[in-house]
Amino acid sequence: MFKLDKYPFGILLGTLAPVLGFILYYFYYSKVNPYDQSFFQFISFFFKQRALLTSVGSLCLIANIILFTLYINGRKDKTAIGIFVMTVMYGMMILYAKFFL
């Protein structure tokens, strides 16, 4: 995994890591919250609550920060740039959704 140093691989990792972070947050949320919500109901609730959108969205980006740090320290700069680009894109999408949806 840490041997590849290509932009598309970084973009792929940067795309999948926040999604995995969101899924992990859902499992945490479903354990703490006594309500029985399906994953799709949670997604609907997630996009309706603007405060939740920015806070959980930011938490999901922590996965990209960890990956970015690992690849920068491993001197895999092309992959790290791909991860960074996707982190910025996710951040812009979160801000757009917060203010315009």
Image (cartoon, helix red, strand yellow):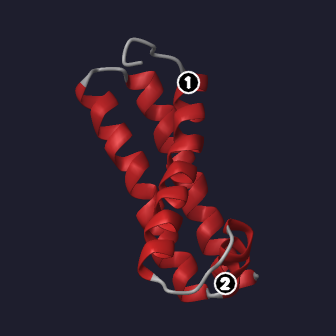
Report the residue at 45% width, 57% height from top.
61
Badge 2 marks a residue whose secondary structure is helix
Q: Find residue 37 and report its image quarter.
A: bottom right
Q: Are marks 2 and 1 in contact (CB under 8 Å)?
A: no
Amino acid carrying label 1: it is Phe
Q: Position of residue 16 (x, y in %)?
A: 57, 42
Mark 2 or mark 1: whose residue is earlier in sequence? 1
For the residues labelled 2 and 1, the Cα–Cα distance comes to 31 Å
Report the residue at 37% width, 38% height from top.
67
Instruction: Work out whether residue 78 or residue 74 is closer to the camera in this orientation and state it.
Output: 74
Instruction: Work out whether residue 88 or residue 15 is closer to the camera in this orientation and state it.
Output: 15
Please state if 8 lies on the left or on the right of 83 as rendered.
Answer: right
Number of labels in the image equals: 2
Please state if 49 lies on the left or on the right of 24 as rendered.
Answer: right
User: Residue reaching furthest top?
Assistant: 3
Please state if 75 lies on the left or on the right of 27 as rendered.
Answer: left
User: Residue reaching furthest left?
Assistant: 73
Badge 1 marks a residue whose secondary structure is helix
Instruction: Work out whether residue 19 or residue 61 is closer to the camera in this orientation and state it.
Output: 19
Q: Position of residue 27 (x, y in %)?
A: 49, 64
Report the residue at 48% width, 84% height from top.
33
In the figure, 77 relative to 87: above or below?
above
In the figure, 94 relative to 63: above or below?
below
Q: Quadrant of the C terminus?
A: bottom right
Report the residue at 60% width, 63% height from top.
92
Q: Position of residue 63 (x, y in %)?
A: 40, 49
Please name the residue that numbered disc 2 is placed on: 99
